[in-house]
Image (cartoon, rainbow, N blue to C red):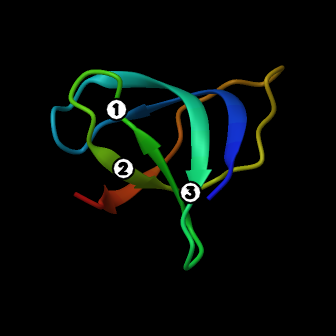
Amino acid sequence: MSALPSQQQFICRKCRSLSDAPAIEEMSEGGFFCRCTECGARNQIVVTGESASRPGVLPVLGLLD
């Protein structure tokens, strides 16, 4: 797995808090996830291609935990 730097945020599916995505991690079978900064849940996200100069809220597909 590799971590990509990000200035994005997402809404955690477990605790519903708005969480920063300091790193977007890639799963070995493909796909990406971010760890919630509040509860630590792994949220599967859609990488939108936005850059640090255009931060936004990432869509969450579901929980991996």
The residue at which mark 2 appears reads as: 43
At 34% from the left and 32% from the top, the residue drawn is 36
Check disc 1 and give the amino acid type. Answer: Cys
At 29% from the left and 37% from the top, the residue drawn is 12
At 20% from the left and 32% from the top, the residue drawn is 16
The quadrant of the rendering that contains the C terminus is: bottom left
Lower sequence index among marks 3 and 1:
1
Considering every residue shown, the one lying at the far front of the view is: 1
* Image height of 45 relative to 6, above or below: below
Mark 3 surroundings: few (<14), some (14-19) or many (≥20) residues within 10 A: some
Q: Residue 56: x, y in percent?
A: 62, 28
Q: Is residue 63 left or right of residue 61?
A: left
Mark 1 surroundings: few (<14), some (14-19) or many (≥20) residues within 10 A: many
* Contact? badges 1 and 2 (CB < 8 Å): yes
Numbered tag placed on residue 36 in the rendering: 1
* Image height of 53 relative to 30, above or below: above
At 69% from the left and 24% from the top, the residue drawn is 55
Check disc 2 and give the amino acid type. Answer: Asn
Lower sequence index among marks 1 and 2:
1
Mark 2 surroundings: few (<14), some (14-19) or many (≥20) residues within 10 A: many
Q: Residue 13: x, y in percent?
A: 24, 45
The residue at which mark 3 appears reads as: 46
Q: Is residue 9 left or right of residue 64?
A: right
* Image height of 12 relative to 63, above or below: above
